[in-house]
Amino acid sequence: MTKTRYIVGIKRITAFLLTFTLAFAYAPTFPVVEANAEDSFVGGLREVTGIEVPAFDYTYAMKKQELNDSLDTEYKAGEASATVKIRDWSMYSSDYYYEHMNADEQKLFDGLDESCRFFMENADIDAVHLQGNGYNGYYLSPADYDNLTTAEVKNIVMIFGYAHPEYYFNGTSYLVSTDKKVYLCCFDAFYKGSTRAAATNAFFNKIDNMIASITSGSKNYLDVEKAAHDLLCNNITYQSNDYDQSIYSAVMLNQSVCAGYSLAMELLMNAVGIPSIVMTSSSHAWNKVNLGNGQWYCVDVTWDDRTTYISYELFNKSDTDIKVRDKQGEHVPNDMCSSYAPSSPYSLSFFDEKEINSTVTTRVPTTAATPTTVASTANVIVTTTTAETTSVATTTAATATTTAASATTSTAAATTAASATSTAATATTENASSSATATTTEAATTENLTPAKPKIKSLKASKGKLKISFKKLTTGEFYTIKIATNKSFTKNVKNIAVLPGYSSLTIKGLKKKRYYVKIRRVRYANARNYNSKWSAIKSAKVK
């Protein structure tokens, strides 16, 4: 009896082992990726929130709204200055989605781009604090749209955010008014121009270092892609935070969720000339990358960043393969991506890798001749509470100057084309003469674009207030007003921008001190600011 039980037991064990062996032998080559308690990435993406509001006068709001200056920075004696380094921002973004839009969608997209670019480049500009039913934040100048539904507007705002990772200050909400205008919200920490300028410099300095790291030596697209993938995995910890829907969290804080990972991967790839886009589902984000062989591949850096090692299970996969390795259904594209994104029918195989010979070349961002100077800060996000809090009415000239900038750019382009045609038809001697003439004309144009030195008509002080009066400007220019508590403008400095159409500005919340004021005119054209000389300084003692 004992022997029989023993034999039966041996047979059962043998059968179990045989079944287990066969099951293992025919298992998929790559195991299904499971998000366990240690490596849980589900739900990291949050959609942008759009709030419908009645039509309102944004310029009036900028003029009258008192802003919270708790993030303001001061100029201090001996403190080094920083500059807003104007670059070719487009090198960091993707135009894939844009090229598949209709004219009405592109109009809104372009407007959002102009608003963000102006905000990025001008340290004199602060975002405006707006508060109402369901919203309370800092908003950029508006972008107009036509013939789009509320759902279509939301899609374009989302696509814009994922196609332009370089605008790190772009928040997770927006306002859409009944007069068909969209106002993007920025993160509170970056609403102040001086703080944002320091943050921009620090951010892109680190981006430059990251690009240098992944492109060091002679590398093809695949090598650079893998280097970027590994760099992000090694330097980012999966952790939610206040900026985790922005690339800022991944690059500057070294902790983010899927949104930050995918935006960082997209920016690095596009910066070195490798096309990349962000894909999104209802709660997750990943990338698609084109390695120059005519195919787009799925890459999920977030899920490849395991707790103790770097995985390649979701590196250069097809649409089908990336879903097979995902039990949660996190890689099912939402309507936005389904409508525009390219398909990825193949995973990258060993044989495909041999065909990827395209090499990257380091692209140097172009810079403007005259950047805007602002106070530098020790920390990127400044939370210093100054001894004196001044509520100011701050304004921007983004909308007002767009038309002037476009007109000037078009004129310059036409002049250049005409000059090039004329030069091609003339002799060598005439070429030299034409070149000299062109140089002289360009210098004259620059001189003509520089505004005349303004005057302060009057400066009146009252209890806790200063009222500054000046000549009203027309469209295409704005004023920068600087106030301080000493004549050398190194103590308690405030920079305020005022849109055209106003002839005075009242600054509230000032202490009983003498304040010094000067103003200058700024004209925005040819993608840069032309600044006048500062006016004569006036002072008044606040009661």
Image (tube, rainbow, N blue to C red):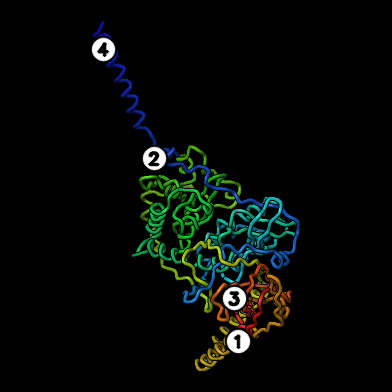
Q: Which of these two is toward me, 209 or 452?
A: 452
Chain-order first, disc 1 or disc 2: 2
Marks 1/2: CA–CA distance:
65 Å
- CB contact under 8 Å: marks 1 and 2: no
Left or right of residue 253: residue 398: right
Query: How far is the residue under mark 4 from the one under mark 2?
Result: 39 Å
Q: Amino acid at mark 2?
A: Phe
Estimate how packed mark 1 is, as few (under 14), some (14 to 19) or many (20 or more) residues with alpha carbons within 10 Å. few
Residue 506 disc label: none
User: How far apart in space, not on screen, are marks 3 and 4 (Cα)?
Assistant: 96 Å
For marks 1 and 3 on the same chain, the one whose residue lies earlier in the sequence: 1
Query: Residue 30 shows which numbered tag?
Result: 2
Whole-number angstrom distance, CA of label 1 to CA of label 3: 30 Å
* Label 3 sits on residue: 484
Residue for badge 1: 447
Q: Position of residue 78 (x, y in %)?
A: 47, 76
Q: Secondary structure at mark 3?
A: strand
- Select label 3 or label 4 by which is in front: 3
Give above or below for 24 relative to 450. Answer: above
Closer to the camera, 120 or 32?
120
Give the mark nearest the N terminus, 3 or 2: 2
Q: Amino acid at mark 4?
A: Tyr
Residue 281 image point, x, y percent: 55, 46
Task: Name which residue type carries label 1.
Answer: Glu
Q: Is residue 38 above or below residue 408?
A: above
| Residue drawn 52% across the image and 72% down it | 375
* Mark 2 burial class by Cα count in 10 Å: few <14, some 14-19, many 20+: few
Count residues near mark 3 (Cα–Cα under 10 Å), then give few for <14, some for 14-19, many for 20+. Answer: many
Residue 6: give its label.
4
